[in-house]
Image (cartoon, rainbow, N blue to C red):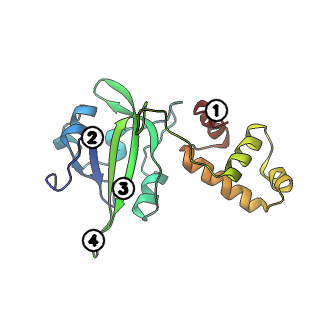
Amino acid sequence: MSETFRSGDALFAYDADMRIVLWNAEAERLTGVQAAEAVGRSCWDVLHGVDEQGAVICHPGCAGARLAREGWPVPCARMLIRTKEGRKPVAVSTISMRLPGEKPIVLQLLRNGDVVGNGKPADVSLTPRQREVLRLLADGVPAKVIATRLGIAEVTVRNHIQAILIELRCHSQLEAVAEARRRGAL
């Protein structure tokens, strides 16, 4: 399979059981983990990804992996992974593939986490309404009050909050507010 997928960046792939099936030479260089060590193991067991506050991102119940296996788009995310030299920041792009009659395979492209794309900090892609909800969350306004202020249903506010958490790759509203401030989105 390694001849099928080529990339100048670190690349690995895992199957529906989150077992690594491909680990390229760039992934070896980035992590210090040889393909023979990585292939067959769970992706979370190899990467040990955490956010900048040390909260575990990579684990058996990983929401990003579940969404990717189900065919949902997963935005590029930043995390710290374990390497032979210690923790290293990476940006992870996720590509989900399913060939007819086959189980899904998920490709993960790892790049320098300090920059994405054109060398600038990763942009935050939120709708104007999501930004409005985020600003109110930053002011400490609860979802029920946000709904009243904006004249929308509380469930709609909660959907916006969920979208914000996914976009910012955060696990809580407080973490999302902090991340949005760090990235200049507030």
- Disc 2 crowd rating (10 Å Cα; few below 14, some 14-19, many 20+) is some
- Estimate the spatial distance between the alpha carbons at disc 4 and disc 1, rounded to whole Å: 42 Å
Find disc 4 in the rendering and name its residue.
102
Identify the element where label 3 is drawn: strand
Q: In this rendering, which labeled residue sits more in front, label 4 or label 2? A: 2
Query: Looking at the picture, how far across and down is residue 114, in whole percent?
Result: 43, 30
Q: Which mark is residue 172?
A: none
- Pointers 3 and 2 in contact (C-beta within 8 Å): no
- Estimate the spatial distance between the alpha carbons at disc 1 and disc 2, rounded to whole Å: 29 Å
Q: Residue lying furthest top in this view?
A: 85
Q: Amino acid at mark 2?
A: Asp
Find disc 3 in the rendering and name its residue.
95
Identify the element where label 2 is drawn: loop
In this picture, residue 21 sits left or right of residue 171: left
Find disc 1 in the rendering and name its residue.
181
Q: Amino acid at mark 3?
A: Ile
